[in-house]
Image (tube, rainbow, N blue to C red):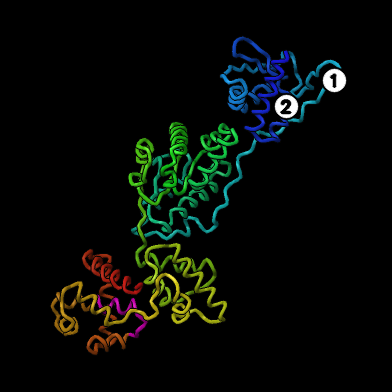
Amino acid sequence: MAAVDSLRESVLAELRRRIDPSIFSTWCTHLQFVPAGADRFQVPLPNEIYRQWVERQFRAPLEEAFQAASGRPVSLDFTAAAGNTSPWPTLQAPAGEPAPALPEPVPAPSRPPRPRLNDNNTFENFIVGPTNRLAHASALALSESLTKNYNNPLFIHGGHGLGKSHLLQAICHALWQRYPDADICYLSCEGFVNEYISAVQNRCLETFRNRFRNADVLLIDDIHFLSEKEGSQEEFFHTFNALHDANRQIVLSSDAPAKDIPKLSERLMSRFAMGLEARIDPPTYEMRVAILRRKAELRGRVIPDNVLDFIANQVTQNIRDLEGAVNRITFYATLTHREIDLSLAQESLKDSFGYRASPITIPEIQQAVCEFFKIKISELMSNRRSRAFSVPRQIAIFLSREMTDQSLADIGAVFGNKDHTTVIYSVQKIKDLIPKDNRIKAAVDGIRTVLQRRLRH
């Protein structure tokens, strides 16, 4: 008997380390273990309600605790006392001791609190364009139902600061709006790894696994953090399988495609490729302007178009940097009690994003256009109407209007004293051709990229 009592104390000590202390004190302090054969124990409980609850919640951690305490696996039989009609009776105490009252029943352990998300990271605030359309459409479709898992997993990848986290959080917001009681689990991969390490150290792996493997939707940001972490990869592999087999949706984001994540196991790589891979590329010029305008609106500020154009040409690769530029300009305007204009923007960003204090000039634009089309400056400046010269001339005028703050008259003067109506015609002509003619679009984007590189050096 003394051996059984000693084993009970050891098992309860191990169990206490595996579950929440308040739950342990409420549900587990009165547990008894009765030998019922070789490596077999009965767990007698006062009634059927208690038996069902304890077995459902504590079988796995109890089996782990028994193995840790005894050094071998055991079988547990949870039994209910016969003929007991009261749902929460008083336990029978040993002779000579007062009978301890069974604590009042408490609700089942609640789900972890919802993660704190950015309230602005919604689908309504996500600017859609050609570089992110597939990722946005896939995320939006996924957010409309918990059961229709068309692409599982959804694997969104692209460089940092391009809106991957925004989309994952937008899914969370949309699902919670439609399904307030849904178990939506969102966290970074670093958070997952840290929680896994903590669970191993504190011997509460079952609690950790129950949290992630019972989720309705699991969203993991920056899954590339699993690189070179063999133990965490093994745990996530089984978590992935449990969710996928249960038809639960999985959404992952990464800075790189699954095949390019270094030292990622082949079986994880193949599972990440089972669903849909959606790539996000840097935003186009038009998207950058729209993003800047939206960021300003969210702060209750209006930024002039020429300032938006200036920022969009300074910051080309990263949405996070676009937001940083808006924050810097609006703060600088508040600090100096000035209206936001191009001069203020140039001052406030002069030490940021590799900005060159002197803006791009029209002669630099003309030179870049001539280099691209392999024509001479004299041919660009001539009045020759051949398409080989008129199109480059119109593109140069278009970019001069877009990338400088020169007036129509000033631009016309630099292009051989063209009047302002010719400048307007050229600008509008190229603007109309860009969405229709891929060669024109490629030329404009290529020349703009060259000029933007010069701006940053």
**Vertical position of residue 18 compared to residue 314: above or below:** above
Query: Along the horizontal axis of the image, is 112 left or right of 289?
Result: right
Q: What separation in Å lies between label 1 and label 2 (alpha carbons)?
A: 16 Å
| Residue 115 horizontal/vertical position (percent) | 57, 48
The residue range painted magenta reads 395-407
**Callouts 1 and 2 close, C-beta under 8 Å:** no
Q: Which mark is residue 243?
A: none
Which residue corresponds to mark 1?
97
**Vertical position of residue 159 compared to residue 200: above or below:** below
Which residue corresponds to mark 2?
29
Q: Nearer the viewer, residue 57 or 193?
A: 193
Q: Quadrant of the N terminus?
A: top right
Q: Quadrant of the C terminus?
A: bottom left
Q: Nearer the viewer, residue 422 or 166?
A: 166
How many numbered circles does the render carry? 2
Magenta stretch: dominant SS? helix
The numbered mark, 1 or 2, whose residue comes first in the sequence reads: 2
Query: Along the horizontal axis of the image, is 240 left or right of 447?
Result: right
Quadrant location of residue 200?
top right
**Vertical position of residue 115 compared to residue 431: above or below:** above
Residue shown at the point (22%, 65%) measured from the top left: 437
Residue type pointed to by label 1:
Glu
Magenta run includes residue 405: yes
Quadrant location of residue 203?
top right
Residue shown at the point (51%, 69%) measured from the top left: 327
Quadrant location of residue 53?
top right
Q: Which of 249 and 335 is in front in this view?
A: 335
Residue type pointed to by label 2:
Thr
| Residue 148 horizontal/vertical position (percent) | 43, 39
| Residue 180 horizontal/vertical position (percent) | 57, 44
